Image (cartoon, rainbow, N blue to C red):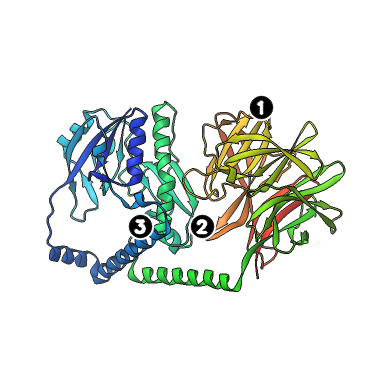
Amino acid sequence: MRIGLLISSNKVSIHQYKLIKNLLENNIELSLIDINATDIEFSSLEKLKREIKQGGIYRLLSRLFFTFQSRFELILLKRLINDADYFKSFKLDDFNFTSVIKVKGNYSKSGLVVRFNTDDIEKIKSKNFDALLRVNTPGIFKGDIITASQLGILSFHHGDNRWNRGGPPGFWEIYLRKPSTGFVIQILNETLDGGDVYFRGNTITNAFFWQYNYYNIKNESYSYMLALILKIKNGHSIKAEDSLIFDNKLYLIPKLHQTLKYQFLLIKKLLSKLSNKITRIKDEWSVHYIKGNYNEISMRKATKISNPKGRFFADPFVVSHNNKNIIFLEDYFYKEKKAVISAVEIISSKEYNILGTVIQEDFHLSYPFVFKVKNELYMVPESSEKKSIRLYKCIEFPLKWEYQYDLISDIDAVDTTIHFIDGKYWLFTNSNYNTTEHNSILECFYADSPISKEWKAHPKNPILFENGGRNGGYVKDAEKNILISQKYGFDRYGKSLEIREIEFLNEKDYKLNRIMNIKPNFDRKIKGLHHLSSNETFTCFDTLKCTY
């Protein structure tokens, strides 16, 4: 495979450097297309006059003020993250490229649009590139450069282009209090950030400040460009999303009053967190249960299980076995800052008995998904701290369980759920590869047995990469294969639930259909809802309140 790298500088970011290094290591021929801008020389005074003429003094002040804000945040970011390479530039001299093509970019006076003359286009076409890849060249490409390679120009847009085109990347999601921040990998056309989308991801918005949010989305996105290119190289068919009408405005550098509002919201957030720390306000989850199947219940009528002092319950799974109805759940200890798996027996619709701990390790455990094989009970609790998906077997119901082995090792994953569909077992789990959160990426693996050690990854992983990608429980349904997932809000983990039907799933493809959202509207004091379990006899769920 041959790729031409569109550059306007010999210096690249750490993400770009690693991408180029990985492409070369995978035997992809890379050439540089070095673009020099046409000379439009302006003195400092002329540049100032042009800026005022195009947008007025207010726009100039807005740009200067936002530049100051951005530089201040970069200084703050350096203190918060242990990633010195992020702030460095790396030279391309370390690599051996197949060729270097010098071309001249004819930029418009605004500096936004770039075109190329016929001779330069022919230089590029003569190399028979499979694709071009924009590395650090600015501008909106127009003209024959768009079709100068077989596939076109691969490029990132760090934003969800269904609503956010333009920039700055990572800012408007915080300003507008969007729960997620997106990115797309696209084949460019002449519409700004409106290319054909071949991959889309949305991860949780880091609501602290925008440079931190941009840092996270860049860390998350670059590995998927590599994965997409390798799929193309290996002959896998890729398909662009269907194009949709874009009816939103173009986002630009924020105006002065918008940056001031952003600063106000940032200070307000910091003061709120400080106040919560001083007053010891904390998030507390609670588990509720009710008799009946999940699609027949009224949540407000459910019985709440009281949390023991210094602890909270969450992630409930209900199991009926040996004439007992047991809820297995996460039992979190505030003092130890980790959880064990505990059991609660349902005596009646209003009466229950907290039985105690069933699994305790020296690492955090949660999400105790339980399933049955030949009348034997097994559990797969969340154990991401051990970088594995661990299997436990019930030795004496319901209190005694023993670790067996890892279903999957060397994986950073949480909230594993196993479904049986069309004669095969499908393991859904929320993986993390590039950041520190597991709230968006849902991956699928399959095997012939739910206790297999040989799980194969679905070729279309990730199955979901969006708000609503994280598993949120399991319900038994005689008519449909149901996928329960949790959704986050802006700066709020576990805001609500989403129910999807798995319309079909095989070793090559899948289709999910969104059925409904479930919100905790039955109690105005409840801030979140992130788990639902039902075995057709009982249904249980958890809720979030802020307590002192």
Number of disc labels: 3
Frontmost residue, 241 versus 220:
220
What residue is at 75 percent from the left and 41 percent from the top? 401
Q: Marks 2/1: CA distance?
A: 37 Å
Residue 457 appears in view: yes
Reply above or below: 369 against 60: above
Q: Residues within 10 Å of mark 3 (few under 14, many from 20)?
A: some
Disc ID at residue 168: 3
Mark before the other along the chain sequence, 2 or 3: 3
What residue is at 35 percent from the left and 62 percent from the top? 75
Q: Amino acid at mark 1?
A: Asp
Give coordinates of residue 147: x percent, y percent: 28, 35
Mark before the other along the chain sequence, 2 or 1: 2
**Residue beneath disc 1:** 448
Give coordinates of residue 353: x percent, y percent: 83, 55
Q: Secondary structure at mark 2?
A: loop
Reply above or below: 161 against 76: above
Residue 114 horizontal side relative to residue 26, left or right: left
Frontmost residue, 367 versus 337:
337
Q: Amino acid at mark 3?
A: Pro
Frontmost residue, 178 versus 426:
426
**Residue beneath disc 2:** 179
